[in-house]
Amino acid sequence: MNDEDKRGLICHLINGSSLALEFPKQSENEAAALLKLENVLESRQLLFEADGRLYIIPFENLRYVRVYPAPANIPGHTYIKGASINHVRAGQS
């Protein structure tokens, strides 16, 4: 898999564990990828095959998900672009 086709997903679960996936590009074009994203958002679960097994993770078991590379645009959704993250511990400002 070349770097241009490399995709990744890190699921941070509510029990404190994480799953990191790396996979090839799943859609030939941006429009098809956006339809797949809408499907995931509507179904409220992540489905993926890894190592010959099917995994189903309901959104209720997720704290957050990191996806890379970030899409250039997600029509119908507003989000902040170009941000950086500074980790702040509870009780600090």
Image: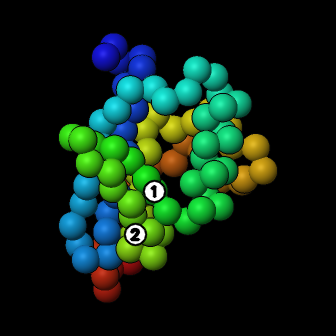
Q: Residue furthest right?
A: 76
Can you say whether 40 is above or below 31 in the image? below
Does 92 sit above or below residue 24? below
Q: In which quadrant is the C terminus drawn?
A: bottom left
Q: Is residue 3 visible?
A: yes
Which residue type does callout 1 highlight?
Leu
Q: Quadrant of residue 81?
A: top right
Badge 1: residue crowd in 10 Å (few <14, some 14–19, many ≥20): some
Label 2 amino acid? Answer: Leu
Which residue lies under the disc numbered 2? 62
Quadrant position of residue 29: top right
Tell me which residue sits at (46%, 34%) in the image. Answer: 69
Secondary structure beneath label 2? strand
Q: How is the image coloured?
A: rainbow
Identify the disc placed on residue 46: 1
Nearer-the-camera pick, 32 or 78: 32
- Mark 1 and mark 2 residues within 8 Å of each other at the beta carbon: yes
Q: Is residue 89 left or right of residue 32?
A: left
Residue 19: x and y, percent?
A: 25, 55
User: Depth check: 10 or 91 in front?
Assistant: 10
Image coordinates of residue 12 in percent, x first then y, are 32, 63
Q: Can see residue 20?
A: no
